[in-house]
C-alpha cells in the first residue's frame, strides 16, 4: 500500500469546484446555521446523511400524486404506486449491481441482518424443508464475525448462536485498526492473539474459517476505523468451506462503487438513511437461489400465495420477505437517492471522499490527537479483486484527544457549529480492544468540502487548551 | 460568557481534574453501606459508587457518613459526582433527598436556574451545572452520579424506595 497515490477508482475523476457547489445546493439543510448563527459543518454522515431535494420531492410527489396500497387493487393509483415502488427496487439494485428480484425492502440494515439470522434459525427448526437444509446450524457449527462489528452485525449472531448451540468466533482487529487475518485459515497459520471464541473447547489449530464454519458476517467498511475489509479474501475462504457470507455494506454503499455480484457475497445489507435517502427503509440483498430457499421470518399479508386454514404457501422472493404494508414512500425516496448517487458517479464520489479522508487524517498532526484506525489512505491491490484500485479506507475518522473525554471534545466542536459523533458508535467491543470507552468521529459524504474539514481541524486544535490539558 | 463557558465553569473543570471521593473505601462494619454501578449506555460513561450510612441513634436521623466512587467519563459526569460527594457528605438522608430533588429541578431548568436563589444556594458548587441544563444531551451526564447515590442508598437499606 502506498500513501502517496490515493485510490480513486477506475476513472480517478473527482468533483470540480463548481460541481461540488452544485451538489451542496441540492441539500437544503446544509444552508442552515446552528448555535447562534454559526455555519453548520456537518461531519456526522456516517451516522446519517443529509438528503438532497430530489429525495424530499420524490417522497412528497408520491404522497401528493401516487399514494395507494401496492401489490393489491387494480385501480389506476394502485398501479402507479406499485410501479413507483418496484421502479425504486430497480434503482437500488442498479446502485449495487444486483438483479432487481434480489433486493428485499427492510425497515433498515439491522432488520435485514436479523432477517437472515432468524431465517437461519427457522431453517434449523426445519422450516423451508429440504431446500433450507443448507442454512441449518447447530452445536459444533461455527458462526464467524469480527471484533470490529457494529452491534447490529454482532448481537443477532450472538443470539443465533445462543438459540442453536452454535459457537460464535471472531476475527481480531490489529493495532492498525484493520482485521488481523493471520488466523483466518489453518494451513500452518496461527490464530491471532485476540482471536476468540465464546467457549474455547481446545480445538485450537483450526483456522477461524474451517469446515465447521457455517456463516461469516462482517462489515465491508468499519463505522469506527473507516477501514475497508478484504472482502475477496474472506469470501474466497468462506466459499472453500461452504460457509454463507453476510456483508454489512452500510458504510460502503454510500461512499464507493459497490458491485455485490462481483464481490460474490451471499447476503448484504445497507440502509437508505446513510445513503442520502429517507429513514425507515433499507435493503437486504440475497443471491436469488438463497432468497428462494431461506424461510420467511415475518409472516402475514402480502407474502403469501395460497392460504387455507391448514397452511400457507409463500410468494416468491423478494415478496416472501415483505409481509404487511411496506414503507412505500420511503422506498420510492430511496430509489431517488440511488439514482442521485449514480448520476454523480460513484467513482467521482469515491475520489472526492478519498481526498476528504486524507484531509481528515491530518488531525494526527495536532498534538495530543490520536487516530483510531488506519492513519493513511492507501490503494487496494490486485488481491482485492473487483475492488483493486479503490481506496483502502473511507472518510470516517475516529480519534481520541489526550486528557479530554470524547464527549467534551464534541461539545467544543459543537460550539463552533461542527457536528461530529461521540461515544462508542455502537461498537463497544472494538473500543474495548483499544482500551478506550469513547471516541469522537468525523465523517464525510458527497457534500463535504475540504474547507469544512479545515475548519474542523482548526477547532479541534483548540480543544486541549480549553480544558487546560497539558 | 459564551454558552460553552457557562457549561464548563471553572469549578467544574477543577472538580474534573481533582475529583473528591474518587477511590472506593471500605465501610465500617457497624455502618450501613450500599453500592451501585451506573452506566450511560449512549456514551459509555460509568460510575461505581459506595455510600457509607451512619444509622440514626436514639431515634435521630440516619446520615451519609461518606461517599466514595470509581468512574470514567466526560468532565461533566466526573465533576458532578465529585461535587455531589462534597455536598451530601455528613447530611441526614432527608436533606440528601431534598438536594437530589433540587438538583433534578436545576437540570430541568433549561439554563435558567432555580427561581428561589436561597434554595439554589443550598446546592453550593452544584449550581455551576446550570449551564449544562441548556444541553439536553448532557443532562444525563450530570445526573449519572446522583442516580448511583440514590440506588446505593436503597441498596444500603437506609432508604426504603427507589422512586
Image (cartoon, coloured by chain):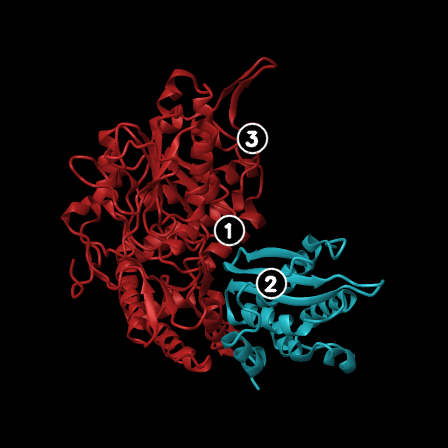
Chain colours: A red, B cyan
- Quadrant position of the C terminus of chain A in the picture: bottom left
Residue A103 in the image: state x and y as whole percent: 40, 37
Q: Is residue B37 left or right of residue A88?
A: right
Residue A319 in sight here = no
* SS category of the residue bearing label 1: loop
* SS category of the residue bearing label 3: loop
Residue A13 in the image: state x and y as whole percent: 22, 62
Q: CA distance from mark 3 to mark 2?
A: 52 Å
Q: Is residue A110 above or below residue A401?
A: above
Could you classify mark 1 by the number of other residues whose Cα lies within 10 Å: few (under 14), some (14-19), or many (20 or more)?
Answer: many
The residue lying furthest to the top in this view is A310
Q: What residue is drawn where x is 36% and y is 70%?
A: A21
Discs 2 and 1 lie in a common subunit = no
The residue lying furthest to the bottom in this view is B1
- The subunit carrying tag 2 is B
Proximity of marks 2 and 1: CB atoms separated by less than 8 Å = no
Could you classify mark 3 by the number of other residues whose Cα lies within 10 Å: few (under 14), some (14-19), or many (20 or more)?
Answer: few
State the residue position of label 1.
A279
Discs 3 and 2 lie in a common subunit = no
As rendered, which of B114 and A289 lies closer to the eye? B114
Q: Is residue A381 above or below residue A202?
A: below
Q: CA distance from mark 2 to mark 1?
A: 31 Å
As rendered, which of A164 and A229 lies closer to the eye? A164
Q: Is residue A194 above or below residue B9?
A: above
State the residue position of label 3.
A72
Q: Is residue A304 left or right of residue A170?
A: right
State the image quarter where residue A390 is shown: bottom left
Task: Identify the disc placed on residue B144.
Answer: 2
Amino acid at each position: 500500500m502506498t500513501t502517496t497515490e490515493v485510490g480513486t477508482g477506475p476513472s480517478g475523476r473527482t468533483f470540480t469546484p463548481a460541481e461540488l457547489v452544485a451538489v451542496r445546493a441540492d441539500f437544503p439543510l446544509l444552508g442552515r446555521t446552528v448555535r447562534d448563527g454559526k455555519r453548520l459543518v456537518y461531519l456526522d454522515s456516517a451516522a446519517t446523511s443529509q438528503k438532497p431535494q430530489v429525495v424530499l420531492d420524490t417522497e412528497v410527489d408520491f404522497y401528493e400524486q401516487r399514494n395507494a396500497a401496492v401489490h393489491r387493487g387494480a385501480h389506476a393509483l394502485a398501479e402507479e404506486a406499485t410501479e413507483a415502488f418496484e421502479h425504486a427496487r430497480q434503482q437500488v439494485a442498479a446502485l449495487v449491481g444486483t438483479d432487481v428480484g434480489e433486493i428485499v425492502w427492510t425497515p433498515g440494515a439491522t432488520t435485514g441482518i436479523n432477517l437472515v439470522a432468524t431465517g437461519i434459525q427457522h431453517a434449523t427448526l426445519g422450516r423451508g424443508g429440504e431446500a433450507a437444509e443448507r442454512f441449518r446450524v447447530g452445536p459444533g457449527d461455527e458462526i464467524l464475525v469480527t471484533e470490529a462489528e457494529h452491534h447490529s452485525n454482532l448481537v443477532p449472531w450472538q443470539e443465533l448462536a445462543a438459540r442453536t448451540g452454535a459457537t460464535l468466533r471472531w476475527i481480531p482487529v490489529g493495532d492498525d485498526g484493520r482485521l488481523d487475518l493471520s488466523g483466518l485459515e489453518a494451513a500452518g497459520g496461527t490464530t491471532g492473539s485476540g482471536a476468540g471464541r465464546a467457549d474455547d473447547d481446545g480445538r485450537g489449530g483450526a483456522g477461524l474459517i474451517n469446515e465447521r464454519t457455517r456463516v461469516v458476517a462482517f462489515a465491508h467498511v468499519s463505522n469506527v476505523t473507516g477501514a475497508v475489509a478484504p472482502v475477496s479474501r474472506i469470501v474466497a475462504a468462506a466459499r472453500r468451506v461452504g460457509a454463507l457470507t453476510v456483508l454489512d455494506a452500510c458504510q460502503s454503499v454510500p461512499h464507493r462503487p459497490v458491485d455485490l455480484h462481483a464481490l460474490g457475497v451471499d447476503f448484504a445489507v445497507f440502509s437508505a438513511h446513510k445513503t442520502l435517502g429517507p429513514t425507515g427503509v433499507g435493503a437486504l440483498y440475497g443471491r436469488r437461489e438463497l432468497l428462494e430457499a431461506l424461510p420467511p421470518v415475518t409472516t402475514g399479508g402480502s407474502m403469501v400465495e395460497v392460504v387455507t386454514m391448514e397452511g400457507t404457501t409463500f410468494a416468491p422472493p423478494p415478496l416472501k420477505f415483505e409481509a404487511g404494508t411496506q414503507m412505500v414512500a420511503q422506498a420510492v425516496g430511496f430509489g431517488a437517492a440511488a439514482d442521485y448517487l449514480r448520476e454523480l458517479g460513484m467513482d467521482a464520489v469515491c475520489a472526492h471522499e478519498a481526498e476528504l479522508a486524507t484531509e481528515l487524517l491530518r488531525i494526527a498532526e495536532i498534538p495530543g490527537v490520536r487516530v483510531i484506525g488506519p492513519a493513511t489512505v492507501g490503494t487496494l491491490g490486485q488481491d482485492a479483486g473487483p475492488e483493486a484500485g479503490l481506496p483502502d479506507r473511507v472518510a470516517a475518522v475516529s480519534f481520541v484527544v489526550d486528557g479530554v473525554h470524547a464527549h467534551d471534545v464534541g461539545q467544543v466542536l459543537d460550539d463552533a457549529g461542527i457536528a461530529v459523533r461521540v461515544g462508542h458508535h455502537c461498537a463497544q467491543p472494538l473500543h474495548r480492544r483499544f482500551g478506550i470507552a469513547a471516541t469522537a468521529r468525523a465523517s464525510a459524504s458527497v457534500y463535504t468540502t475540504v474547507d469544512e474539514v479545515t475548519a474542523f481541524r482548526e477547532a479541534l486544535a483548540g480543544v486541549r487548551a480549553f480544558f487546560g490539558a497539558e | 460568557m459564551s454558552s460553552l463557558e457557562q457549561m464548563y465553569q471553572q469549578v467544574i473543570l477543577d472538580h474534573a481534574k481533582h475529583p473528591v471521593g474518587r477511590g472506593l473505601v471500605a465501610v465500617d462494619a457497624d455502618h450501613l453501606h450500599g453500592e451501585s454501578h451506573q452506566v450511560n449506555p449512549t456514551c459509555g460513561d460509568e460510575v461505581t459508587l459506595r455510600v457509607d450510612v451512619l444509622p440514626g441513634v436514639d431515634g435521630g436521623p440516619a446520615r451519609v457518613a461518606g461517599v466514595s466512587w470509581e468512574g470514567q467519563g466526560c468532565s461533566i459526569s466526573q465533576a458532578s459526582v465529585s461535587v455531589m460527594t462534597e455536598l451530601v457528605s455528613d447530611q441526614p438522608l432527608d436533606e440528601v433527598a431534598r438536594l437530589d430533588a433540587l438538583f433534578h429541578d436545576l437540570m430541568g431548568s433549561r439554563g435558567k436556574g432555580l427561581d428561589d436563589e436561597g434554595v439554589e444556594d443550598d446546592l453550593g458548587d452544584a449550581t455551576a451545572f446550570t449551564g449544562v441544563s441548556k444541553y439536553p444531551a448532557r443532562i444525563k451526564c450530570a445526573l449519572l452520579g446522583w442516580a448511583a447515590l440514590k440506588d446505593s442508598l436503597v441498596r444500603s437499606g437506609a432508604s426504603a424506595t427507589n422512586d
